[in-house]
Amino acid sequence: MSDEPQQQDPGGQGGEPAGTGKAKKPKRPKRKGWRRIFPTWRMVLGGFILLVLLGVGAFMAGYMLVEIPPANAAATKQSNVYLYDDGSEIARDGEVNREKVPLKQIPLHVQRAVLAAEDRDFYGESAVDPKAMIRAAWNTVTGKGKQSGSTITQQYVKNYYLGQEQTVSRKVKEFFISIKLDREVSKDEILSGYLNTSYFGRNAYGVQAAAQAYYGKNVKDLSTGEGAYLATLLNSPNAYDVATHPENKQRAAGRWSYVLDGMVKEGWLGKADRAKVKFPAPDEAKGAAGLSGQRGYVVKAVEDYLTANKIIDEETLAKGGYRITTTLQKDRQDAFKKAVDDQVMSKVDKKARKVDRNVRAGGASIDPATGKVVAMYGGIDYTKQYVNNATRRDYQVGSTFKPFVFTSAVENGSVTQSGQPITPNTVYDGTNKRPVQGWSGGTYAPENEDQVSYGDTTVREATDKSVNSVYAQMAVDVGSDKVKETAIALGVPKSTPDLTASPSIALGPSTASVLDMTEAYATLANHGKHGTYTIVEKITKDGEEIALPEQETEQAVTREAADTTTSILQSVVQGGTGTAAQGAGRPAAGKTGTAENDTAAWFAGYTPDLATVVAVMGQNPETGAHTPLYGALGEARINGGAYPARVWAQFTKDALEGEPVKEFDLELEQGADLPVVPDPTTGGTPDPATDGGATTGGPTDGGTTDGGPTDGGATTGGPTDGGATTDGGQDPGGQTGGQTGDQSDGGATADGGATDGGTADGGAAQGGPDGGATDIGGTDDGGASDGGDLGGLTDG
């Protein structure tokens, strides 16, 4: 061994002995500055692994802990109880309509239609689809509509084992039960269970019950088109039932086409066969016996209200167990039915007149101060006429829409083409087929009823007589888009079919429901304050109260706009087409209306206390098609100023019996009460005694507004309108009255002539302005004061 000292490490740092060939590993520098706030890749990886382990552990725990339960108790549905506002019972919905059938009895094309609608990858996918669940959640959050990301397996689990409540715990259970069920039973068993438990609407659970409810046949006999329609219903039974909601047929047909196109895409249906399939309209629904009379209509209206406002979803409500107190008042509900029976249904004679079988009626009444629906008439009997005529949205509202045009004019400070402010006294040209001015969308020249030209006429007179040419021009002057906005603000739903911003909007081609129009007129009655209508006062289940939306009231239009509209609608009742409403014995404002081809007649009106709308409609009971009412009830034509106004008058009188008579408290727009300034270009001089008069019709055109001879001036031919005392009969004065009273009001062939009304309703065959209707198609409502051919409504 050498005695020399051992050689030191160069630099005196120590470390590995020289000659070993290994250098010491340097220390990792410490993270400094902004880099300290970010995790290292080791931390990220470790965290990810930890999350995976936790997720796997949670999944295993959930899978082991969650057991497949027995069928839920909701498989045996409870009844919902519906009450009047005083707590007395209206109705109980019936027992569950359910019939189970084996999968082999369900045609393959029906099974595939359901798969095309709900889960096209059912046989090849797992029980849950995470991507679909994430996509559905994203679409719901981003406003693309509430969507389901559930597979058929998940939907079956929800229907049969769990419930419809939207909770996290229910979704978690659904997730694990679906996975377990998918491992333990076959796909065919799951599909069979789904088809036998799903809700199809009309109280039908399962595809067999649905086949009977919609087509009156067993499921094994369904065609491809019928099966596709039942599959369509699974997405939204109430919305796609086109017999109950005819206005939704376009949406339903679109969904139905989606189902069939999906079958083609999956190779389950040939293109040629697809082209041959026609939309199979379902049978008209039949109400349960326990829901006869008005009860079923009330139940249906309440269901629609609860589901539309997302208070309770359709399937959950169908499970039952709710106690629902409505806002309906029993005495007023009874009064509405009696008014319709007395004034309309008692006149129906199906043996004598085939058209009488088509007569339908609907009505609704709202307290303007509260927005509560106090009465509703849905039809003659829910078990005979299933569709609620008070809530359906498929009949044109006609001239009952015109007041919204004038309201919008005042609300927006609109002026005529010549720059004159629009007030009740503003003069317009009421010439028949006068092209509107200032409209860039092409030529539009609407006809007045019976082709009558009125010449220069005030807005008030044009409202009394419902002059189309005036109101179409006014819609352009205001701006049809603004008119639409005003109508929506008053209460007409934004989604109303044919509510289109064009000059024709003034003539009422839109198809709002009776209840929609009642809500809008209630806003006018409430001085422009709009509170969304409600038909439900309180809901409880198992003693627990269900939260209802807060009823908020807002100033939809200015008080001046609403009140000035009320002032001209008072004139309609006092001396225009709505004089029959005077039978209520109350200060009243209202407007008549007629749908195209006289398929419906309306009266919409209000007192300071009550807003009510009544419609008489024509519908073929077999095909469901809208039909004209010519000759119905023994009359040549049905007008809003006749039967609807009479129903309105009787109901309003009875509903307000014992309550003090209130006058309208109105604040009018500036200039609304000023006399008409003569137009120097025409040389006409308005006559103050005739409400502004008309420069083309003589001093008798317009008449007085309170009693007395109103339409012909002369009394030669009877007390009113130059007509006979028997409304057009052959007695002395019948023909001569029309001829001598005033050629401007009826002429030889109008109202009082031997032809019982001549051309139409007190309208003048000789061009007189009084009484001619102005609605789309049919008469507007009984002539100016005599009811035309419908019975002499005022008789002086």
Image (cartoon, helix red, strand yellow):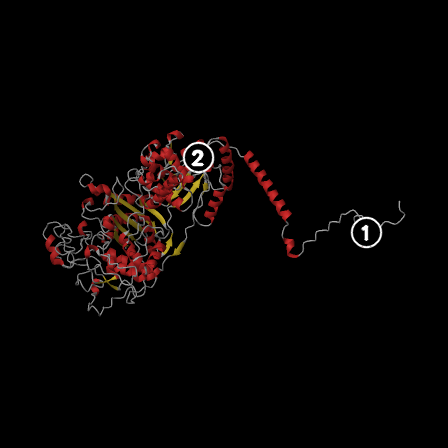
Q: Is residue 422 left or right of residue 38?
A: left
Q: Secondary structure at mark 1?
A: loop
Residue 63 x %, y % = 54, 35
Residue 302: x and y in percent read 37, 43
Indicate the amino acid at tag 1: Asp
Q: Earlier in the sequence, mark 2 or mark 1?
A: 1
Closer-to-camera residue (478/330):
478
Which residue lies at the image location 72% right of the left edge and 51% below the top edge?
27
Q: CA distance from mark 2 to mark 1?
A: 87 Å
Towards the viewer: 198 or 15: 15
Q: Which mark is residue 74?
A: 2
Q: Nearer the viewer, residue 306 or 11?
A: 11
Asked if 178 appears above or below 404 in the picture, the reply is above
Query: What is the three-letter code of the residue carrying label 2?
Result: Ala
Which residue in the structure is indicated by mark 1?
9
Instruction: Name, please, the residue furthest toward the right.
Output: 3
Q: Secondary structure at mark 2?
A: helix
Give the side of residue 116 with respect to residue 336, left or right.
Answer: right
Q: In which quadrant is the C terminus drawn?
A: bottom left
> Residue visible at 89% across and 49% down?
4
Residue 586 appearing in the image? no
Looking at the rendered image, the disc whose residue lies closer to the viewer, 2 or 1, is: 1
